[in-house]
């Protein structure tokens, strides 16, 4: 087991592609293997291929490089297949967010819950299903690692429709979670630090925090309160923050005081609850409704990153800088750990398998796991608190209905998913919203969504 083959479907992903190149080159356990880059955009694929070639040459790495616009050319022999793609992601998330706002639904990210999560699934999940069919045929023993939002929906869908494939899903939101909370608690991030979290992806909750048997949750809460006060002072002085970061610490404290537990991924969790929507009848709410996802900012970031890639390729930037610009990425870090048996632990989206004792074994949750080539094994959590559990179950049902609707191309299931979704509040508005979004996305959604519905 010395020459792993890792295939990246969506190598032009700027969140993952460059970091994957970095770790495949620098890992002593992966650099003797094969990195296969796949992207349907030939120009972007060529840029990432040439970037990888330069990084490989600069580091004198024995890594074999493959690249193709057709995944079937490179899937054979794969040990891991990472799904990390999206088409015009920022544009369509903007369409989802702006359109939903007309119907009273505000989304700060628009890619995991609410109409944004449902319609992103409609755009991406059909491609995932096609990819899984090819994986089943060409490399059925490979681990399939979903790295595409909505992570939980796609993870549920792959488990449901390709149970014979080995799969799990990842998100970067909790990658440094333990380190961050250890810092807030003022304790070392070592084996004496016990941190229990659980929930669906982007809706996870801090259930326990101890250091050497001492409860450090009060220290964490105090640190979050202090950060919330600092945020308020900056806002009062004219400071600005992006939609996913806006008032996060204040919202964390408000949810902690109301629900009894601290959410761990506020940039997304605040979008999963109804409290920060515009449906209000008094002026007693301390936190205003959510800001909408900022498309121009995301497009500028994308342009800046591609310019950086171009600078490397044109020798306007020294390729040696690439080595210090990046570090481990959750997906390739997990892959390295699995392949080499390093014994590291990660937050992974996988089947519950009894970790949360009062939720179903097949509930698809983000849990702290041991993971090796036999797959993730969640650490025991205990019970999910009453109240928070019901919110988790609603989210999981919404996700499952979404995966079913897209797999079946079923309008009735699509409607049901959005009616169960925690953000919708009107049947009539939901029906109008579906039609509005369908009309605006004719250029990318499968044609069957526009066929007459049989009566």
Image: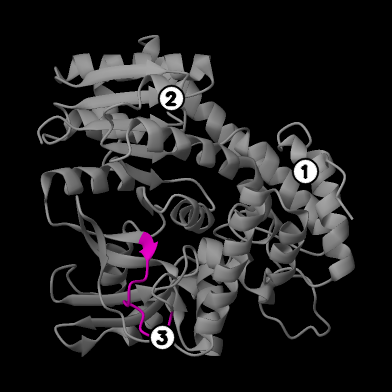
- The residue that disc 3 covers is 358
Using the rendered image of the protein, determine whether residue 421 is visible from the camera's viewpoint: yes
Give the mark toward the camera: 3 or 1.
1
Q: In which quarter of the image is residue 290?
A: bottom right
Q: What stretch is highlighted in magenta?
A: 349-359
Q: How is the image coloured?
A: one colour
Q: Is residue 336 left or right of residue 395?
A: left
Instruction: Check the image and report above or below for 258 versus 446.
Output: below
The total number of labels drawn is: 3
Question: Which is more toward the observer, 270 or 359?
Answer: 359
The answer to whether the residue labelled 2 contacts the one labelled 3, judged by CB atoms less than 8 Å apart, is: no
Magenta: predominant secondary structure element?
loop
Q: How far is disc 2 from disc 1 in space, using C-alphas?
A: 26 Å
Using the rendered image of the protein, determine whether residue 16 is visible from the camera's viewpoint: no
- The residue that disc 1 covers is 449
Instruction: Give neighbour class at mark 1: few <14, some 14-19, many 20+ (Cα, 10 Å).
Output: some
Q: How far is disc 2 from disc 3 in space, using C-alphas?
A: 41 Å
Quick check: is 355 in the magenta stretch?
yes
In the picture, which quadrant includes the C terminus? Answer: bottom right
> Residue farthest to the front?
455
- The residue that disc 2 covers is 71
């Amino acid at each position: 087991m010395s020459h792993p083959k890792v295939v990246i479907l969506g190598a032009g992903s700027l969140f993952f592609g460059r970091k994957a190149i970095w770790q495949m080159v620098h890992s002593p356990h992966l650099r003797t293997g094969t990195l296969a880059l796949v992207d349907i955009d030939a120009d972007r694929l060529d840029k990432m291929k040439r970037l990888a070639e330069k990084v490989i040459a600069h580091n004198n790495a024995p890594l074999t490089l493959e690249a193709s616009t057709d995944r079937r050319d490179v899937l054979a022999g794969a040990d891991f297949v990472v799904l990390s793609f999206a088409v015009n992601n920022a544009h369509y998330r903007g369409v989802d967010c702006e359109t939903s706002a007309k119907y009273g639904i505000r989304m700060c990210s628009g890619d995991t819950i609410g109409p944004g999560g449902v319609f992103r699934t409609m755009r991406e999940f059909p491609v995932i299903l096609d990819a899984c069919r090819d994986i089943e045929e060409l490399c059925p023993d490979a681990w399939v690692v979903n790295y595409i939002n909505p992570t939980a929906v796609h993870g549920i869908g792959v488990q449901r429709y390709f149970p014979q494939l080995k799969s799990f899903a990842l998100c970067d939101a909790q990658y440094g979670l333990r380190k961050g909370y250890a810092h807030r608690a003022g304790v070392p991030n070592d084996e004496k630090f016990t941190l229990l979290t659980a929930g669906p992806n982007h809706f996870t909750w801090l259930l326990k925090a101890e250091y050497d048997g001492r409860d450090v949750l009060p220290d964490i809460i105090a640190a979050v309160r202090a950060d919330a006060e600092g945020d308020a002072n900056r806002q009062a002085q004219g400071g600005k923050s992006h939609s996913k970061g806006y008032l996060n610490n204040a919202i964390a404290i408000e949810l902690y005081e109301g629900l009894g537990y601290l959410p761990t991924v506020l940039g997304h969790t605040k979008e999963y609850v109804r409290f920060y929507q515009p449906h209000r009848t008094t002026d007693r709410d301390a936190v205003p409704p959510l800001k909408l996802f900022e498309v121009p900012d995301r497009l500028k970031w994308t342009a800046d990153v591609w310019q950086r890639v171009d600078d490397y390729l044109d020798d306007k930037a020294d390729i040696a800088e690439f080595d210090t610009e990046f570090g481990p990425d959750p997906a390739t870090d997990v892959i390295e750990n699995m392949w080499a048996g390093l014994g590291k632990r990660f937050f992974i989206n996988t089947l519950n398998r009894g970790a949360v004792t009062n939720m179903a074994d097949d509930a698809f949750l983000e849990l702290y796991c041991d993971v090796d080539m036999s797959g993730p094994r969640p650490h025991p959590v205990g019970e999910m608190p009453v109240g928070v559990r019901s919110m988790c179950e609603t989210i999981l049902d919404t996700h499952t209905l979404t995966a079913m609707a897209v797999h079946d191309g079923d309008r009735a299931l699509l409607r049901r998913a959005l009616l169960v979704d925690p953000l919708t509040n009107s049947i009539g508005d939901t029906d109008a919203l579906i039609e509005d979004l369908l009309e605006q996305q004719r250029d990318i959604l499968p044609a069957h969504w526009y066929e007459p519905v049989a009566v």
